[in-house]
Amino acid sequence: MPGKRVNKLSHILISRTDAIGDVVLTLPVAGYLKELFPGIRVSFLGKAYTGPVIKCSAYVDEYIDYTDLLTMAADEQVSILKSKNIDAVVHVFPNKHVAHLVKKAGIKLRIGTTNRVFHWFTCNKLVKLSRKRSDLHEAQLNLILLKPLGLKLVPTLKEIVAHNLFKPTVPLPETLASLLSTSKRNVIFHPRSNGSGAEWSLEKFKQLAAILPQDKFLIFITGSEKESVLLKEWLKTLPSNVTNVTGQMSLDELIAFISKVDGLVASGTGPLHLAAALGINTIGLFPAKRPIHAGRWAPLGKKVSVIESEGDTLDSIQVDTVSENITSWL
């Protein structure tokens, strides 16, 4: 819900210098800023790794590469930010270096949380926010930081989904497009999480691939180049309707590929959030353990299903439960 305008702002910077899933759940902040301040310019400071993700948001006018900034001398970093004529910064992810940098750059309005000591010295608008103890979703917690800018109520998750216009920025290469079936449902299994969270066992992913009808489903296994090595022997045991594309795509291409398939199954990892934001069928597997449970980290999209375990691991999630969810897409 829009609130009262804070002075006159023409350019606002969102800072979130962590991982893909975190960034995807922060992108709606840009949509709400556009609603609060019609005509506002929104920039997003993020790592080079997440740059392709940030550029997919229709609400982000400029991506600023934090990884590139770190290669420059301190005075040049300040000079670059000064040249952007930014009026306000929202520190969604606390970063001590960024907090000091934007202050040195003379950005007048600097919003951060009270639970980071360095924000007391670098920010002039502090928001009381404890993510660890909150029952809110990560995307809602991100938006609480907009209260000093006039956001009065924390939006519902359904409302947040409507503020995330997310589309691929590159076309899918023909070499990858040709792999997709026109007569079967194309489904991605992303079995690994790069160590970012709980994982469903490879044996259960194998069983899932085996029980899905081969005449109705074409399955793709995605993962990083590093994960492709770790999965090499397991991949050899999968049914003939499974195609290995691990380590074969840039992040831009992965986003484009995900947008063209019918669905994706994964635990709480970046590609899960990408799939949800792209609007395809998305099944997220989560442990009941706080603070990594679905209540905090579920993917946000119009076609999302979440299956939560009964304990701290994903072991209790049954293959049949996931299979029934996938076959419902037919």
Image (spheres, helix red, strand yellow):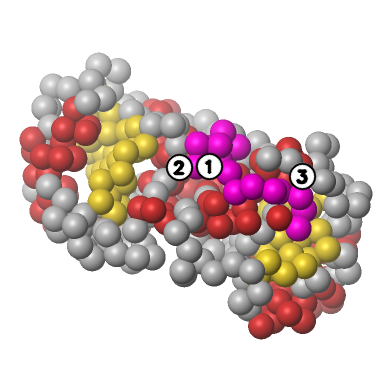
Q: Are marks 1 and 2 in contact (CB under 8 Å)?
A: no
Look at label 1 and name its amino acid.
Answer: Thr
Give the number of the disc on residue 156.
1
Label 2, secondary structure: give it. Answer: loop
SS class of the residue under badge 1? loop
Mark number displayed over residue 3: 3
- Badge 3: few (under 14), some or many (20 or more) residues near its Cα, within 10 Å? some
Is 288 on the left-hand or right-hand side of 233?
right
Q: Decide: is 248 above or below 119.
A: above
Tell me where the magenta segment starts and ends, as one range.
148-164
Tell me if mark 2 has few (under 14), some (14-19) or many (20+) residues whose alpha carbon lies within 10 angstroms of its own: many
Separation of marks 1 and 2 at Cα, in angstroms: 11 Å
Which of marks 3 and 1 precedes in the sequence? 3
Residue at the image point whose x is 72% and y is 73% from the top: 99
Q: Nearer the viewer, mark 2 or mark 3?
A: 3
Tell whether position 158 is magenta: yes
Residue 73, above or below 85: below
Q: Which mark is residue 300?
A: 2
Q: Name the residue: 72% across, 45% down.
A: 33
Q: Amino acid at mark 3?
A: Gly
Give the percent coordinates (x, y) of residue 47: 60, 61
Q: Is residue 166 visible?
A: no
